[in-house]
Amino acid sequence: MILEALGSAVLGLVLAWAAAHRLSHRLPARPLVYSTGIAGALFGDFVTHTALGPGVDWLSLLGAAAISAASLSLLLRPAGRIRRSATA
């Protein structure tokens, strides 16, 4: 259980690093991105481990990656300026 949680935290850190490296212009400060990635992965591991039970570690890591990616996607900002119509 401890190794599974540690593995999911490392997976969340790697996903957060990749997102911060690739999308740095669309994300907030890096400490927030890293902490969100790790927290999302730990929460995803907890949810999938609770739903599936022990013995399916790779599915728990898959759930951790999915929830971590979903929580990181919530931090994204729009790429460009928001255009307003002439009537507004």
Image: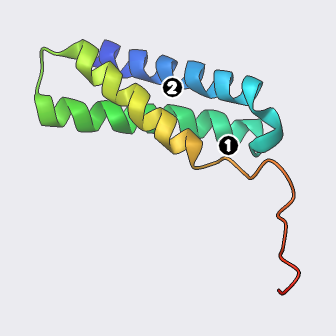
Residue 30 image point, x, y percent: 75, 36
Question: What secondary structure is marked by label 1?
Answer: helix
Q: Does the rendering let one see residue 39?
A: no
Disc number placed over residue 12 in the picture, else none: 2
Most extreme residue toward the bottom is 87
Determine crowd level at label 1: few under 14, some 14-19, many 20+ residues with C-alpha closer than 10 A: few
* Mark 1 and mark 2: Cα distance apart in space: 13 Å
* Helix, strand or loop for disc 2: helix
Report the residue at 20% width, 29% height from top: 49
| Camera-side residue of 69 and 79 | 79
Residue at 66 percent across and 28 percent down: it is 19
In which quadrant is the N terminus drawn? top left
Callout 2 crowding tier (Cα within 10 Å): few <14, some 14–19, many ≥20: many
Quarter of the view holding residue 44: top left
Q: Is residue 61 above or below residue 73?
A: above
- Of the 4 image quadrants, the one containing the C terminus is bottom right
- The amino acid type, in three-letter code, at marker 1 is Leu
Report the disc number at residue 17: none
Looking at this view, is 80 or 22 the one in front? 80
The extreme front residue here reads 86
Above or below: residue 26 compared with residue 37? below
Q: Position of residue 31 (x, y in %)?
A: 71, 37
Q: Amino acid at mark 2?
A: Gly
Q: Is residue 19 left or right of residue 66?
A: right
Q: Is residue 4 visible?
A: yes
Q: Which mark is residue 32?
A: 1
Q: Residue shown at 74%/25% (left/top)? A: 22
Position of residue 58 relative to residue 22, above or below, is: above
Judged left or right of residue 50, residue 27 is right
Q: Position of residue 10 (x, y in %)?
A: 50, 17
> Can you say whether 30 is above or below 14 in the image?
below
Mark 1 and mark 2 in contact? Answer it, CB < 8 Å: no
